[in-house]
Image (tube, rainbow, N blue to C red):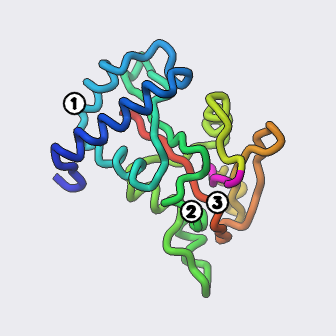
Amino acid sequence: MKNKLSSQLQEELIKTLKIRFEKNPNRHENIKWENVQKKLESNPEKLWSLHEMERTEGEPDVIFYDKKTDEYLFIDCSAESPKGRRSLCYDRKALDSRKENKPANSAMDLANEIGIEILDEEQYRELQTFGNFDLKTSSWVKTPDEIRNLGGAVFCDKRYNTVFLYHNGADSYYAARGFRGFLKI
């Protein structure tokens, strides 16, 4: 199977996730770690994506359980936009449009490679109810088609105790802007 973790890496990842889960009980009230662990162990193909979230310093954690679909939602909960996912333009179209000084990748392409989805504005605002995130950095969020079709893309951050939504050309990239993703398991 492509993108499969060794047993040792699976164990290390689950241990890391358990420690983070126990350190941040406010993110997952009424969710029991034992149930999360069973779900993780029965979905080894998703562990690779979680490992990539961790490797790129996203610090994924469980923040929601959907009873209807029996899925846990893991979101990047690093204090700042994940270090391993910064300096990226928004998508492939933006990357291809740059004539020079191209970034290494785009946020949408990297999310796809990792097997996660980029947060939308609503999800980003929901994440901010669990703490203070992106006080020094910013994160691309899923951009509505009507904005993207005009060459723009949107990103969020938190300043002055307020979540802000901003715009930029989709081909722009900055050392302090990355993206946050989520994975359903």
Residue 137 x/y as whole percent: 67, 54
Describe the element under mark 1 as helix, strand or loop: loop
Residue 88 x/y as whole percent: 57, 66
To which residue does mark 3 refer?
Answer: 177
Q: What residue range appears in magenta?
A: 136-141
Describe the element under mark 2 as helix, strand or loop: loop
The single residue placed furthest to the right in the displayed view is 160
Crowding near pointer 2: few (<14 within 10 Å), some, many (20+)? many
Residue at 71%, 47% (x, y): give it. 135
Residue at 48%, 27% (x, y): give it. 23
Crowding near pointer 1: few (<14 within 10 Å), some, many (20+)? few
Magenta stretch, overall SS: strand
Looking at the rendered structure, the kind of residue marked 1 is Ser
To which residue does mark 1 refer?
Answer: 42
Describe the element under mark 3 as helix, strand or loop: strand
Looking at the rendered structure, the kind of residue marked 3 is Arg
